[in-house]
């Protein structure tokens, strides 16, 4: 296994493990306030210190990982689940009105700044993690539609697609059988990029108060709350910041590594 | 003293040797043909001389140019030399020019860089050089962009670029491989003329022995990074000393045995469109009931974009009233240059595209996009590019079994795949492998296995051997001939390579600008062409003079 893939797997795995573990156990209860313990630097009792309410930051990070990963994962799922079939159909029916309709619809979504739409959605439906998921998910759709259409278009000109057509296969079947597996590497890489962007977007929405609401922990909310005390107790801001950086970095390394590992042409070269 | 002297050049990547002890000499004004199969080290030898080796390559030995050791020079010194003393022309004219620069600026650029010439003066010389390569001023102003030129014209610009500074040595790496046969003849003539008139030494790198036969003073044959034989052209062709040279020569004129048998073609009437003016050609042919494939008045029209708003769409008649037939078990060739409509016709015959007029029938069924699956099973296809013909994510057995989609996958499909693989000379166990584990020739065999698996009556071979080395090509042609005899297959052999078509088909169609201009028995058509276009094609096709090959027994074993 390549070192980059290994490092990516370790970092992403750590975030995932923390999120899963937080379901059953955290070092301290994050809903309990202990003002007497506030703003303690990292120590043996509190590995990452405590915040201004005296809550254990390590426990907050674990619970926050759950929110961040869940929001990003579902948002990528929405983007892929809707965007990839749209992109494949647009490529299969290239130049037809279907293609035009799909791609112009994408342009429409792209034309709006995502934060504005997120504010709109939360203004109408109220701020919550669920609405953050929907807002981020909608903006993933055109990304995946474009990537899969572009990848598919270059494949549709290849001889093995013509051979499949000579074998009587229809456009839908060719898309599923020949096109999708061959654009999977593009989608995996784009998926990890969108996943990490999703984590950043969730942090951003929570930071401006449109995402997860208290008492739900979130890395973005932690950053927002720590902001005013950054000179007084820098570790309070540093901890969620580093968590975001490490997870995003890990996911990107994982995506690159997976792309190579999933390609049969490159498999033999991985020692 | 010789102009270029390569002395025991060794080249390796990491620990893998690429070139071993390459020694070559070249006199001023001499044309050297450097031939060999892909991977033999021809291009690496050229890149060593240019100092353009890829990263990680280690070259040892000496390359003397005019008494200067090129391998000892710094990159800076090589830059001064490249273009100035050594020019190079590459294979692909479509990517060799910068699409955002006018042709005049591109030719003038070398002059401005090397001679520090003012722009106006450089452009004047660029004009002269473009005139010299056959792109005269009135029709080809300096302000043209590469996309406004054809492939052959672009290759001329690339040549003008390479000779702008009158280098002593010109290296042409497969300069005509991507060009049509008539364009190829023109570009080769130009190169020969330049070498002779300007006393410029030329290294012509090619896989095509026929090109070398007509061009080179001397030939060097490369294999596995070594020069196995070198000598003056004619004696080398007449009496090759190295067995590998003999194999190459035998393979390039190879004629599969089975193809020589008299086919149903002999019964067909000779036909030339000029003579038959007035009689719609398909009427003549529709009398025969025995035909397997019947193309009658096939016409495919493409609507082009409107030249201006509200103007009617101009039309391109890519296939224009084409009629012919193929009998069961017959081999028919279809030749023509790029853009003549061969590919469009192929797509129509495969039932992928609709026709605007006329009809195609296969057996008893009309052919078209809506044809029933069972009827499709009678025709299969083998494409040109062995690297693009397979889904890299599927195993070979899945790839070969794909046409079963038409007939339903039988219970014993894996046995049938194994049998098909054995038939094309591969091991049944190869089914479990992925396509990247095979060479180009093996991939074409797999493509043939895929075409065979549902026992079609007609296989369309769309430039199926064009991308293969000569010896592999000869083996694949033999395989096709054997399979034709054992399965009673009909072949439609589409190719730009006239010698291959001549050797494997019994009847031949010549296509130009969407129309069949001549058709008839292959031998008659090749020996006494009736249409001027056929004659032009034949005259342009490079050929090893038959007299050179007579001296040797034809029984040279093919390995």
Image (tube, coloured by chain):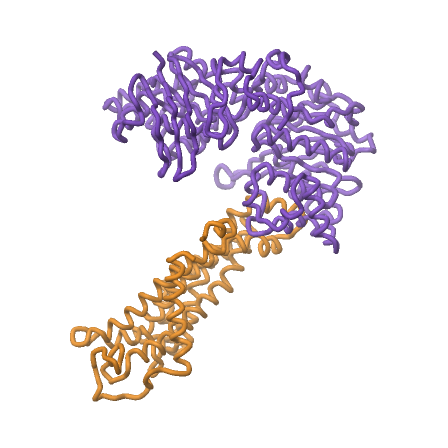
Chain colours: A orange, B purple
The residue at the point 45 percent across, 55 percent down is A259
Is residue A56 toward the left or the right of residue B14 in the image?
Answer: left
Rendered location of residue A26, percent (x, y): 36, 82
Rendered location of residue B291, percent (x, y): 79, 33
Is residue A33 toward the left or the right of residue A14 in the image?
Answer: left
Rendered location of residue B203, percent (x, y): 43, 20
Looking at the figure, which quarter contains the N terminus of chain B? top left
Rendered location of residue B230, percent (x, y): 48, 18
Is residue B372 toward the left or the right of residue B548 in the image?
Answer: right
Position of residue B239 relative to residue B346, above or below, is above
Is residue B496 toward the left or the right of residue B85 in the image?
Answer: right
Position of residue B427 relative to residue A138, above or below, is above
- The count of marks equals 0
Position of residue A100 relative to residue A57, above or below, is above
User: Which of the pair B244/B135 is nearer the observer?
Assistant: B244
Q: Quadrant of residue B149?
A: top left
The residue at the point 28 percent across, 22 percent down is B122
The residue at the point 70 percent across, 37 percent down is B459
């Amino acid at each position: 296994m390549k070192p980059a893939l290994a490092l990516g797997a370790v970092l992403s795995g750590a975030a995932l493990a923390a999120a899963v573990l937080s379901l059953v156990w955290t070092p301290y209860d994050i809903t309990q306030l202990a003002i007497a313990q506030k703003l303690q630097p990292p120590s043996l009792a509190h590995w990452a210190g405590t915040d201004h309410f005296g809550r254990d930051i390590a426990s907050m990070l674990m619970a926050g990982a759950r929110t961040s990963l869940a929001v990003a994962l579902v948002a990528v799922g929405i983007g892929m689940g809707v965007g990839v079939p749209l992109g494949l159909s647009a490529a299969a029916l290239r130049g037809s009105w279907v293609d035009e309709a799909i791609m112009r619809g994408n342009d429409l979504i792209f034309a709006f700044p995502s934060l504005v739409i997120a504010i709109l959605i939360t203004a109408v439906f109220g701020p919550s993690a669920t609405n953050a998921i929907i807002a981020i998910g909608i903006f993933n759709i055109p990304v995946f539609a474009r990537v899969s259409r572009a990848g598919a278009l270059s494949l549709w000109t290849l001889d093995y697609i013509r051979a499949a057509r000579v074998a009587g296969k229809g456009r839908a079947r060719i898309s599923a059988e020949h096109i999708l597996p061959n654009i999977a590497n593009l989608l995996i890489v784009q998926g990890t990029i969108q996943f990490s962007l999703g984590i950043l977007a969730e942090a951003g929405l929570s930071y401006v108060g449109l995402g997860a609401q208290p008492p739900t922990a979130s890395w973005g909310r932690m950053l927002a709350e720590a902001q005013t005390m950054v000179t007084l107790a820098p570790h309070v801001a540093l901890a969620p910041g580093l968590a975001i950086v490490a997870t995003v970095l890990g996911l990107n390394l994982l995506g690159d590594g997976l792309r190579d590992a999933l390609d049969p042409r490159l498999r033999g070269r991985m020692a | 003293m010789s102009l270029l002297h390569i002395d025991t050049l060794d080249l390796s990547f990491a620990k893998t040797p690429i070139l071993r002890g390459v020694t070559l000499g070249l006199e001023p004004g001499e044309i050297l043909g450097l031939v060999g199969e892909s991977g033999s080290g021809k291009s690496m030898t050229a890149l060593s001389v240019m100092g353009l080796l890829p990263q990680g390559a280690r070259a040892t030995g000496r390359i003397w140019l005019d008494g200067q050791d090129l391998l000892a020079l710094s990159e800076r010194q090589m830059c001064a030399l490249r273009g100035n003393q050594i020019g190079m022309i590459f294979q692909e004219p479509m990517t060799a020019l910068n699409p955002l620069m006018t042709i005049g600026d591109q030719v003038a650029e070398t002059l401005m860089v090397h001679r520090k010439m003012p722009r106006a003066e450089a452009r004047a010389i660029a004009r002269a050089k473009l005139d010299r390569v056959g792109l005269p001023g009135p029709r080809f102003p300096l302000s043209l962009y590469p996309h406004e030129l054809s492939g052959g014209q672009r290759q001329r610009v690339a040549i003008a670029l390479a000779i702008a500074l009158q280098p002593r040595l010109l290296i042409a790496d497969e300069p005509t491989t991507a060009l049509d046969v008539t364009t190829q003849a023109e570009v080769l003539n130009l190169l020969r003329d330049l070498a002779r008139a300007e006393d410029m030494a030329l290294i012509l790198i090619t896989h095509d022995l026929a090109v070398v036969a007509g061009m080179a003073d001397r030939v060097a044959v490369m294999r596995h990074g070594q020069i196995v034989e070198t000598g003056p052209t004619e004696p080398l062709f007449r009496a090759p000393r190295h067995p590998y040279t003999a194999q190459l020569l035998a393979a390039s004129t190879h004629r599969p045995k089975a193809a020589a048998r008299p086919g149903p073609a002999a019964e067909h009437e000779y036909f030339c469109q000029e003579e038959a003016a007035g009689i719609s050609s398909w009427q003549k042919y529709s009398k025969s009931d025995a035909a397997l494939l019947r193309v009658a008045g096939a016409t495919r029209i493409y609507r082009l974009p409107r030249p201006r708003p509200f103007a009617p769409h101009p039309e391109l008649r890519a296939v224009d009233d084409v009629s012919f037939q193929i009998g069961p078990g017959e081999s028919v060739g279809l030749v023509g240059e790029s853009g003549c409509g061969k590919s469009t016709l192929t797509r129509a015959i495969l039932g992928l595209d609709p026709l605007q007029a006329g009809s195609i029938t296969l057996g008893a069924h009309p052919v078209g996009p809506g044809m029933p699956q069972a009827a499709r099973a009678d025709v299969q296809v083998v494409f040109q590019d062995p690297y693009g013909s397979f889904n890299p994510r599927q195993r070979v057995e899945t790839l070969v079994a794909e046409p079963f989609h038409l007939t339903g996958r039988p219970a014993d499909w894996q046995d049938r795949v194994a049998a098909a693989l054995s038939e094309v000379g591969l091991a049944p166990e190869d089914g479990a492998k992925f396509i990247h584990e095979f060479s180009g020739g093996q991939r074409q065999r797999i493509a043939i296995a895929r075409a065979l698996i549902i026992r079609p009556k007609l296989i369309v071979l769309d430039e199926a051997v064009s991308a293969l080395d000569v010896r592999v090509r000869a083996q694949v042609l033999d395989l096709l001939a054997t399979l034709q005899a054992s399965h009673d297959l009909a072949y439609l052999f589409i190719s730009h390579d006239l010698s291959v078509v001549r050797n494997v088909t019994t009847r031949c169609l010549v296509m130009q600008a969407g129309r069949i201009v001549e058709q008839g028995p292959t031998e008659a058509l090749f020996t006494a062409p009736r249409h001027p276009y056929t004659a032009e094609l034949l005259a342009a096709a490079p050929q090893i003079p038959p007299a050179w090959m007579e001296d040797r027994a034809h029984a040279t074993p093919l390995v």
